[in-house]
Amino acid sequence: MKKKLRFSASYKYIFLVVMCFVFAFPFIWMLIATTNSSTDIIKGKILPGTFSIENIKVLWSTVSVNRVFLNSVRNSVAGTLASIFICSMAGYGFQVFRDKAKDRLMAILLLSMMIPFAAVMIPLFIVFSQMGLIDTTLGIILPSVSTAFLIFFFRQATSSFPLEIIQAARIDGMGEFGIFFRIFFPVMSPAFAAAAIITFMGNWNNYLWPTIILRTQESQTMPMLLTFLASGYTINYGILMMAVAICSLPTIIVFVTQQRKFVSGIMGSVK
């Protein structure tokens, strides 16, 4: 009986290893492709090459990777901080404060998630053009500062926070901002971490709105750079894969370093 259990367990581990390799293979192949020439990549070479340094030199000589990377970092970090600050306070208020109309307002916010961004893209561009926000960082981050998903996420996370603590703090004379920043925020840090990871990845990978709102190459972002490298008559897949690897690096670092808080924050919001 024990031999059968060990045999079945070994099959499970083999299956898991194979599935992990299948899902990780595109990422592994991308890293390998950064070391090969464009010709080798087209031929389907799956072994590491010796062109990594040359791909880096060609990429840096073709476009200003440092400027584009810093633009993406600035836009993503600023958008993430603004979204977390506004949406967390909105979700906190929806759950903590009592009002007859808040459930109806939340229902309207959730219904707004059904409207595709393409439907509001043109009116949004017209408004931002009249406000003089074309080709600005503020013009990029404003549409994503307040989202129905994040507000709902923080409302669900706040539902697991003991309201007795808030009431006790109010009795002691602490204001709502003090309760939020000195009590709620430290306790709910996993939920904030999970929301920050989701928002940062969304802002970093955002392509459609920056393409519409940005006009100059000096304000280009990493997804726009990838499109530029892949849209030529002759595509150098070596430098394209190198740019893809550089573009993927921040999101990988953020998720790997914060994955425990991400899981606990998601589980807390679900509860």
Image (cartoon, rainbow, N blue to C red):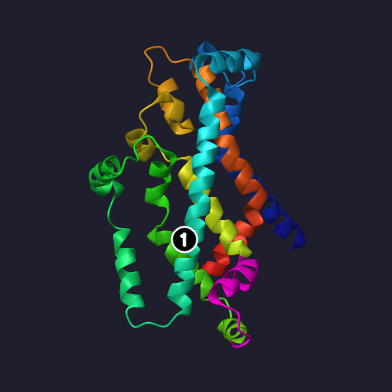
Q: Identify the residue at image location x=45%, y=80%.
A: 97
Disc 1 secondary structure class: helix
Per the rendered image, the range of residues in magenta is: 171-188
Tell me if I can see residue 155 in this picture: no
**In x, y percent, where is residue 58?**
56, 13
Nearest the eye: 169 or 144: 169
Quadrant position of residue 138: top left
Q: Identify the residue at image location x=46%, y=40%.
A: 205
**In x, y percent, where is residue 214?**
37, 33
Residue beneath label 1, please?
86
Q: Identify the residue at image location x=56%, y=66%.
A: 267
Nearest the eye: 55 or 2: 55
| 232 to 7, vertically: above or below | above
**In x, y percent, where is residue 123?**
23, 46
Based on the picture, tell me whether residue 177 belongs to the magenta stretch. Answer: yes
The quarter of the image holding the N terminus is bottom right
Based on the picture, tell me whether residue 185 belongs to the magenta stretch. Answer: yes
| 81 to 233, vertically: above or below | below
Left or right? Give the position of 208 relative to 13: left
What's the amino acid at mark 1?
Ile
**In x, y percent, where is residue 52?**
63, 17
Left or right? Give the position of 250 relative to 7: left
Left or right? Give the position of 10 relative to 62: right
Tell me if I can see residue 63 in this picture: yes
Nearest the eye: 32 or 147: 147
Quadrant position of residue 190: bottom right
Q: Identify the residue at image location x=61%, y=82%.
A: 169
